Amino acid sequence: MYFEQFYLNCLAHASYMIGSNGEAAVVDPQRDVDIYLEAAAEQNLKIRHIFETHLHADFVSGHKELAARTGAKIYIGARAEAKFPHVALTDGFQLKLGSVSIRILETPGHTPESLCIVLTDEEKSRDPWAILTGDTLFIGDVGRPDLSRTYTAQQLAGMLYDSLHQKLLVFPDSVLVYPAHGAGSLCGRNMRAERSSTIGTERLTNCTLQIKGREEFIQQVTTNLPTRPDYFLQDAEINRSGAPALTDLPSLPALTPVEVESCLARNANVLDVRPAEEFAAGHVPGSINIALSGQFASWAGNILGIDSDPILIADTEAHVEEARTRLARVGIEGVRGYLAGGVSAWQKAGLPIAVTAQISAVELGEKLRDRGVQILDVRREGEWQAGHIPQAKWHALDVFPHQLPAVEDAQPLAIHCKSGYRSMIACSLLERAGHHNLFNVTGGYDAWHAAGLPEVSEQPVKA
């Protein structure tokens, strides 16, 4: 048996290929599918089957394009009511792939149509070898239950409890667990960094599986959920119908500085994907910084929305293309174009440049002693509760698209996150809204903690 995990860091997304006897199955493919075609060719396999563990909400799947390019069948849970040609899966469905047995477990909870895939390598044993758990069971966590238009979070949480205890935890401790997401994904809250586990390890170490009783489980997994990005439900609907091929997207036009300036005057979203330090040193006024490093696509979907039609600014055309592909992975397809020549061309055209001030954690500590600065923490609630700067107010970046924090421009405002990535996004959004007495805290809370500066743990005071 051939088995490979493909991990996409920017979406914390894991997909899989299983092969035997010249045939292969792909599970939960990402939008750009060439990686599976190349792997199959290297292994002398033909992709005949494509499985979706559920209608993904955090990214656009490549199942439709991969099926078109290979002739493979698509398999998805019957409750998905998929609108493309497919095999509707129900509990107990089995497929033989050479020496590999594939068996389906319906495991509703994360979504109504969620399922898990049990793999048995019959050349080695008649006992199950691994379970591809989709978004039902993660490493250290379980899937969030609030992504349905038809069920309440409490109803889905109850289904999730039943699926975990009646379907997954009945397997032997030795069975491997391969989820569809890892740490950083918004499909859960407390995922660990490992990319696989075992049923036994999760039984002992997964805090959510330690909760005693169904009602307590429902209460805990529906409390303090991360803010659900608006694009999640839109992506699920795209996946229900199947997305067009990436190759169908038109080429991006190169825009002059004057054209970009005109678009900005009409409130266009101009997305600068350069590193935070480059953006801080000089950028197009009114542009938004979401750097290609980090979870670029997720934050772009969250902050801009999938109908945002942004204009891109990058250092190179290769970075423009990379940004475009990564945006398409979350459903942002209407990119208007890119600034030809980047910020250098903007400067050469004699157009104004904006600068974002930066401050170190130690410098911030000194200013606080003089009471000369406000502090805004844009991390998520769990991060805040684990420890924060005593004088800080809290307003998670996830909430910015719906409500910007109240800002008093009379006194400087220092903005921080964990490391500086999210805080620069926040700075750029506040600058676009007309606030300029701002500092980005370089190194973020990690640098504050490393410097041994004061910390407290308590409920957040919102800005």
Image (tube, rainbow, N blue to C red):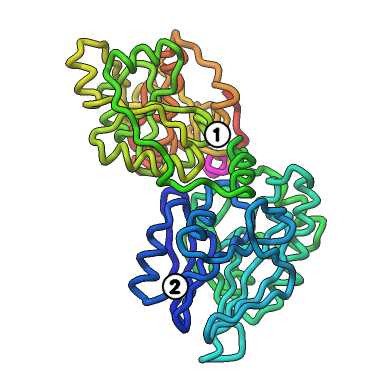
Q: Amino acid at mark 1?
A: Asp
Could you say where residue 36 lies in the image, as x and y percent from the top left? 41, 63
Q: Nearer the viewer, residue 171 or 375?
A: 171
The image shows residue 165, relative to residue 69, as above or below, that is below
Residue at 66% from the left image edge and 77% from the top image edge: 94
Query: Going by the image, does 94 lie left or right of 281?
Result: right
Examine the image and state in which quarter residue 131 appears. Answer: bottom right
Could you say where residue 330 lies in the image, as x and y percent from the top left? 50, 43
Q: Bounds of the magenta span?
A: 382-386
Q: Which mark is residue 398?
A: 1
Query: Going by the image, does 427 lie left or right of 319?
Result: right
* Residue, disc 2: 46
Query: Going by the image, does 325 lie left or right of 91?
Result: left
The answer to whether residue 365 is visible is: no
Could you say where residue 128 lies in the image, as x and y percent from the top left? 60, 83
Considering the numbered disc 1 on the image, is that residue within a helix, a strand or a loop?
A: helix
- Mark 1 or 2, nearer chain start: 2
Say how many tags the image has. Answer: 2
Q: Amino acid at mark 2?
A: Lys
